[in-house]
Amino acid sequence: MSQVHEVVAETYYRTFSRSYPVLARIAAGDTVVTKTLDSGGQDLHGEHLHESGNPLTGPFYIEGAEPGDSISVHLKKIRLNRDWGYTSYRLGLVSLNPDHIEKVYSDQYEMDLVRDGRANMLPWDIDLERKTVRARKPGSDTSGLEFDADPMLGCIGVAPEGDFTPTSGPSGPYGGNIDYNQIREGATVHLPVYQPGALLYVGDGHALQADGEPLGTGIETSMDVEFSVTLHKGRVLSGPRVESTEYVISLGSQPEFSSALNRGLQMATSDMASWLVADYNMEEWAAHMLIGMVGIYDVVTVAGSMALRVPKANLR
């Protein structure tokens, strides 16, 4: 019989590692109810519980998961739990042309406005009832800068293969700091298993974030998270995949600046072609034609990963 595990971590981590004590052991089909810190290590009360840099909640040990398997993480709830967040003050320079960079404004706005010793961060107000976000400072004469919130998780992943212990900054085949705005409530994230128990981690909630995370941040905030896990024995994946109600999505997940975006595109396209053949019984040529007609590419991170979406309506 499935169980519900209500877990609030006391210790957080900044690497996807196989070496940390297990936060909770869960069986496939169980539900986990937990919380995440913001990227700066603050909880829903604004208390600093960890240093900045995407502290992670976990690891969660999935009973029966072994290398060569895969897991599906069903994100039942990703909910805002406090009334403020923050962003950087300027687009990441990697998003801009070199000639534009020469004229761009300074990223220094106001010291200690969001965090002591930092002048490059802006506060945002989050209206939990209306589910909106609004820039608090500085005021704009031309735009209200108020938007509907669309909560997502920036970090979701498992302990990688071998002794590799990446920080919670990059992404890779194990997941990691994917920063894909389709990883939100109702989505399912498929991940390969490299270590016994998979050792799943979550974190880095954003109240809203554009495609590609061009600021280098979303609206960083803490989250209430609820998920369940399905285990697939012997189902080998080359990297993360995502499913929504409308799309199957392959991710070309790689660290930013490690390779050009076309490499991420190639990874996502190759995986999608394989997925359509293996799981949807399509001829290889038909899978190529389907991708060529209805595939949708997303920039996941401006200097790293790409995604390829195929509408489920075309798979019936």
Image (tube, grey):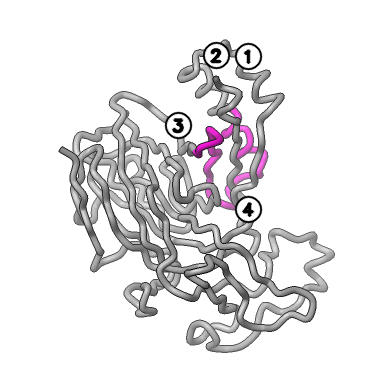
Residue type at the position of mark 1: Ala
Q: Mark 1 to mark 2: distance in Å?
A: 6 Å
Contact? badges 1 and 2 (CB < 8 Å): yes
**Residue tagged by mark 3?**
238
**What crowding class fits label 4: few (fewer than 14 Cα within 10 Å), some (14-19), or many (20 or more)?**
many
Secondary-structure class at tag 3 = loop
> Is residue 214 left or right of 65 when viewed as pictured?
right
**Residue tagged by mark 1?**
286
**Residue tagged by mark 2?**
282
Q: Mark 4 to mark 3: distance in Å?
A: 22 Å
Secondary-structure class at tag 1 = helix
> Is residue 223 left or right of 289 when viewed as pictured?
left
User: Which percent across, then down, holds residue 142?
Assistant: 79, 76
Query: Measuring 31% from the left and 29% from the top, which residue is drawn there?
Result: 232
Earlier residue among tags 4 and 1: 4
**Residue tagged by mark 4?**
212
Q: Which residues are magenta?
A: 244-269
Residue type at the position of mark 3: Ser
Residue extending farthest bottom: 111
User: Which percent across, then down, holds residue 112?
Assistant: 53, 88
